[in-house]
């Protein structure tokens, strides 16, 4: 049995400014660092064996706050990068929607027909995440593994376990909250059972203030 835990990085400056991040980066906010610290307190006694993180600074910084004193290895995995948005990265969401209405509509309404001029398609995203999860299954049976990734990439990983097609991508669930915790238990035959999904009770009290 493999216990796979998945989280999204903490809140960033560009999250607040509603900018496309993708492969570009912005720093964690004070709240983002607090979110990660609170998740650390929640997971520190789980007995994790290893952490894999997106190489993006916002994800790496989150992973380091999650690890803290834990004596476990942390590895960067390019497969956990956020979906690439090319020339849209760094730009405000509303501006991109206005200037690229048709392409943005495909991104949201018919993902299988979304073919960016620059950036990454959903097919490419699904391929790299599926390959990565296959490697985790092969190499970490019987262990507890934490993945630190991004909103859309996490959603692609969950689509694998939920058996959702690309065009069902936005219908299955919303983008996860920052540093929310998802727990998927994977049996020896490779099937995954979602035991917890997008749970952020460790910092929900901050949202309610």
Image (cartoon, rainbow, N blue to C red):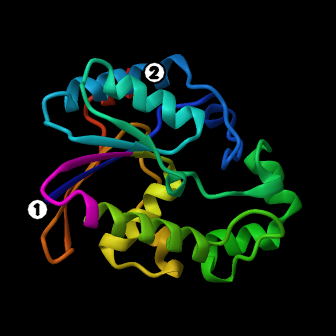
Magenta stretch: includes residue 67: no
| Position of residue 146 measured from the top left corner of the image (x, y, whole percent) | 30, 45
- Residue position for label 2: 33
- Say whether residue 186 is left or right of residue 177: left
The range drawn in magenta is 138-147
| Up/down of 66 relative to 77, above or below | above
Give the mark toward the camera: 1 or 2: 1
Front residue of this view, candidates 107 and 40: 40
Residue displayed at 84% across by 64% down: 100
Residue displayed at 27% across by 67% down: 138
Question: Tag 2's secondary structure?
Answer: helix
Residue displayed at 58% across by 52% down: 82
How far apart are the two marked residues, 1 and 2, measured between alpha carbons? 32 Å
Q: Disc 1 or 2, which lies upstream in sequence?
A: 1
Residue 103: which quarter of the image? bottom right
Q: The N terminus appears in which quarter of the rendering?
A: bottom left
| Position of residue 168 measured from the top left corner of the image (x, y, whole percent) | 47, 78
- Residue position for label 1: 1
- Say whether residue 82 is left or right of residue 71: right
Residue displayed at 48% across by 25% down: 32
Question: Tag 1's secondary structure?
Answer: loop
- Say whether residue 47 is left or right of residue 150: left
Tally the numbered discs.
Answer: 2
| Position of residue 120 measured from the top left corner of the image (x, y, whole percent) | 69, 66
- Say whether residue 203 is left or right of residue 44: right
Let me know if residue 34 appears in the view. Answer: yes
């Amino acid at each position: 049995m493999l216990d796979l835990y998945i989280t999204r990085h903490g809140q960033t400056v560009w999250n607040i400014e509603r900018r496309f991040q993708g492969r570009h980066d912005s720093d964690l906010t004070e709240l983002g660092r607090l979110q990660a610290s609170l998740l650390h307190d929640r997971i520190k006694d789980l007995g994790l064996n290893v952490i894999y993180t997106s190489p993006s600074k916002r994800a790496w910084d989150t992973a380091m706050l999650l690890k803290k004193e834990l004596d476990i290895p942390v590895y960067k995995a390019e497969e956990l990068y956020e979906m690439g948005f090319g020339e849209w990265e760094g730009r405000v969401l509303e501006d991109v929607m206005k200037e690229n209405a048709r392409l943005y509509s495909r991104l949201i309404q018919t993902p299988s027909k979304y073919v960016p001029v620059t950036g990454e398609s959903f097919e490419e995203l699904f391929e790299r995440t599926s390959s990565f999860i296959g490697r985790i299954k092969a190499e970490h049976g019987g262990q507890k593994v934490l993945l630190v990734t991004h909103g859309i990439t996490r959603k692609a990983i969950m689509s694998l376990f939920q058996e959702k097609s690309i065009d069902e991508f936005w219908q299955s669930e919303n983008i996860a909250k920052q540093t929310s915790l998802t727990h998927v238990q994977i049996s020896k035959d490779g099937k995954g059972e979602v035991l917890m999904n997008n749970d952020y009770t460790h910092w929900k009290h901050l949202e309610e203030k």
